[in-house]
Amino acid sequence: MLPTLMITGGLVFDYFTPPQFTAVPFFAAAPLIAAPFSSWIATLLTGIAATLSVLALRYYNATVSEVTSFTELFTVLTVSGLALLINRLVRLSRERLASARVIAETAQRAVLPAPPARIGGLQIAARYEAAQADAFIGGDLFAVQDTPFGVRLVVGDVRGKGLGAVEEVAVVIGAFREAAEQERSLEGVAARLERALAREDTRRDELDAVEGFTTAVLAEIPHGEGVVRVVNRGHPEPLVLYADGVVDILEPPQAALPLGMGDLAAWPDRSRAHPLPAGATLLLYTDGLTEARDADGVFYDPGERLAGRLFPGPEELLDALVDDVRRHTGGAATDDMALLAVSRPAEGQPDRRRTVRVVRAGGDSDPEEGEGHRPAAGRTRDRHRA
């Protein structure tokens, strides 16, 4: 409406002021305002309306033959022509941006495809949340593979940003998919990833070769067994959410360097088994979740925020988690966030129960769930389960 208001304001101004005052700035501004926001036709019509308004006022004031009238008319015509050019350039830029977005989304699907909703009898949900608007992929990664040894998973975070990080994501995921099918142990998969990154570093420049690394968690859920085996290479600890609302933090037996830093220290990887009974959900994530801060600088604690909550399935868990992080940060996330949730369904449980609300442990519905309130009392299971 602003171009119309500018032309109307110019007419009113010229009508109620002496002839020596001119409303040309109003008429010249109208097509310029329309150019980046309206179509080419709308911009053209705005320029025509502004030009006709100048002519009508000069005829009304009987000053059409004066030199200043020709100058004013030429000014509005020139600005209208420039507005049409600006409109065309803006439209071309938008088309190129839309094409780049399609290419970026296609690249994401190729490098980081969404896993199927059900693999090996497990329910799967994954989410990639970019911190920057219109960004599609960065250095966070996840992958799920059904193998003869069980369902194997990886969630990782590559150092750095941009194209180099995306290239390393492709290397890690490609190496994981091959190793997951061939290696009999999870430790062997980790060793293969270490070698793949070492090869990748040899072709990078000197700085990336020295400082490049990838934090990662590897997990294996054997077929028919109620356990999950985990190898953690410098990554945030996964969580297990049990059917009674208890949250278990899967801490590694000892700290380990990230992948790609094997030349600094060497020790054998050792997987650790944790219970994953029917109805439990394994949650893996990158540090974009735990480093999300509110206005007071308080970090987001997924173990505390999820304790005492029950979710119908992994998809609903990730939906609630992403919404809660946005409320915690006020929508001002500073890092990308990759989430992967894997649920072992209880006997007779349907694949999806989207109509079931998120409830507190004990079965009471949470009327404040939509407002982002935490439960009044939640429990986090001791980190070292018997």
Image: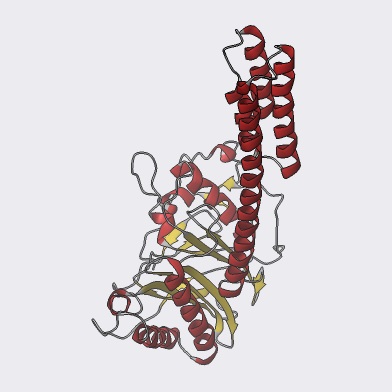
For the point 63% across and 66% down, the residue is 345
Picture coordinates of residue 266, whole percent (x, y) = 26, 85
Residue 137 against residue 44 in the figure, above or below: below
For the point 63% across and 37% down, the residue is 78
Colour setting: secondary structure
Front position in the image: 64 or 167: 64
Q: Is residue 364 left or right of residue 142?
A: right
For the point 50% across and 46% down, the residue is 326
The quarter of the rendered structure image containing the N terminus is: top right
Residue 24 against residue 133 in the figure, above or below: above
Picture coordinates of residue 140, whole percent (x, y) = 46, 66
Residue 43 against residue 249 in the figure, above or below: above
Picture coordinates of residue 277, whole percent (x, y) = 55, 68
Residue 268 against residue 26 in the figure, above or below: below
Q: How many marks?
A: 0
For the point 52% across and 82% down, the residue is 174
The quarter of the rendered structure image containing the C terminus is: bottom left
Front position in the image: 197 or 164: 164
> Does residue 206 appear anywhere in the picture?
yes
Picture coordinates of residue 218, whole percent (x, y) = 45, 76
> Does residue 36 appear anywhere in the picture?
no
Front position in the image: 128 or 19: 19
Q: Give residue 272's quadrant in the image.
A: bottom left
